[in-house]
């Protein structure tokens, strides 16, 4: 069992725990059995991600596995939204996030290992190679690919990873998030990228057209936040993608192919 060393744990207990989360965060809390992990985030009123997290349902409440640099801010904001609700919210510093075969499936991707929240003594050894694992699975992470109030949920593919329930009742930032989804043509996405010399901050180009920026890289693969409408233009114009003048290849995932096709069809209808 290996510890994820850049994570912190928040513990929520009390009879109003699920009601608090239902009205504030992006994921649903309905039909949530003990032991299941769910992916979600708290947004700004303008719809940008303050912090995302993985939440574990327990018999006594919910454990939130969040990046350590975002933990105190998330704790403060959840307490602010608590109002008179019967919910206790605190850091659980004796617990750690860990990779464990006995843990819950990572809700973001079946390509990632199972994870759990355990006492610190049970997972003393930190895990090496986590960046390579998540980048290969196409999973952006807070603190590495983005930070607070920089991106919208669709920018990091939260809607594709079951992290946003657009049919639930109100949550903070829901109006903006739902409007972006209903528009149908999402302009920014995080994509997997292969090539030589990939490094965070490097610009993707297709001829004279700027497509986006590499946000993280490991083992010859990278994640990049791109403009999908411009990527569609590059495909229509048969312009190869480059990073620092070297050839690069964007992974043509089925969802990305569908969104590029929608952009091309919309352009043809103009």
Image: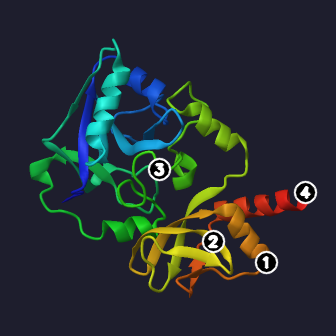
Residue 200 seen anywhere in this rendered image of the structure: yes
- Look at mark 3 in the image and give the residue it sits on: 150
Q: Locate residue 208, reporting x and y percent.
A: 68, 78
Q: Earlier in the sequence, mark 1 or mark 4?
A: 1
Mark 3 vs mark 4, CA separation in Å: 32 Å
Q: How is the image coloured?
A: rainbow
Q: Quadrant of the N terminus?
A: bottom left
> How would you rate the neighbour count of disc 4 (Cα within 10 Å): few for under 14, some for 14-19, many for 20 or more?
few
Looking at the image, do the residues carrying marks 2 and 4 touch, with CB atoms under 8 Å apart? no
Q: Locate residue 265, reporting x and y percent.
A: 84, 60
Mark 1 vs mark 2, CA separation in Å: 14 Å
Give the secondary structure at mark 4: helix
Residue 62 seen anywhere in this rendered image of the structure: no
Taking depth in this image into account, of 140 and 207 the one nearest to the observer is: 207
Give the quadrant of residue 88.
top left
Q: Earlier in the sequence, mark 1 or mark 2?
A: 2
Mark 3 vs mark 1, CA separation in Å: 31 Å
> How would you rate the neighbour count of disc 1 (Cα within 10 Å): few for under 14, some for 14-19, many for 20 or more?
few
Q: Nearer the viewer, mark 1 or mark 2?
A: 2
Residue 237's tag is 1
> How would you rate the neighbour count of disc 3 (Cα within 10 Å): few for under 14, some for 14-19, many for 20 or more?
few
- View extreme (top): residue: 84
- Name the residue rendered at 84%, 60% in the picture: 267
Q: Locate residue 35, reporting x and y percent.
A: 33, 39
Mark 1 vs mark 4, CA separation in Å: 17 Å
Give the secondary structure at mark 2: strand
Give the secondary structure at mark 3: loop
Q: Earlier in the sequence, mark 3 or mark 1?
A: 3
């Amino acid at each position: 069992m290996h510890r994820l060393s850049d994570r912190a744990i928040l513990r929520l207990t009390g009879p109003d725990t699920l009601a608090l989360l239902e009205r504030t965060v992006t994921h649903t809390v309905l039909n949530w059995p003990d032991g299941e992990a769910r992916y979600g985030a708290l947004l700004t009123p303008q719809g940008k991600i303050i912090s995302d997290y993985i939440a574990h349902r327990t018999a006594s409440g919910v454990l939130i596995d969040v990046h350590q640099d975002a933990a105190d801010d998330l704790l403060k904001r959840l307490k602010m939204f608590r109002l008179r609700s019967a919910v206790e919210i605190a850091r659980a510093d004796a617990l750690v996030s860990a990779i464990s075969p006995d843990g819950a499936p990572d809700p973001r991707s079946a390509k990632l290992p199972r994870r759990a929240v355990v006492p610190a003594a049970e997972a003393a050894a930190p895990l090496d190679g986590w960046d390579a694992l998540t980048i290969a699975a196409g999973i952006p992470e807070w603190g590495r690919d983005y930070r607070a109030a920089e991106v919208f949920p669709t920018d990091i593919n939260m809607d594709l990873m079951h992290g946003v329930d657009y049919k639930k009742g109100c949550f903070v930032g829901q109006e903006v998030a739902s409007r972006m989804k209903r528009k149908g043509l999402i302009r920014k996405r995080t994509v997997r990228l292969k090539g030589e010399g990939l490094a965070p901050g490097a610009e993707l180009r297709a001829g004279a057209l700027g497509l986006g920026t590499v946000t993280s890289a490991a083992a010859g693969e990278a994640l990049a936040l791109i403009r999908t409408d411009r990527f569609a233009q590059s495909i229509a114009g048969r312009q190869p993608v480059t990073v620092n003048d070297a050839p690069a290849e964007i992974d043509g995932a089925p969802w990305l192919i569908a969104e590029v096709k929608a952009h091309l069809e919309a352009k043809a209808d103009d």
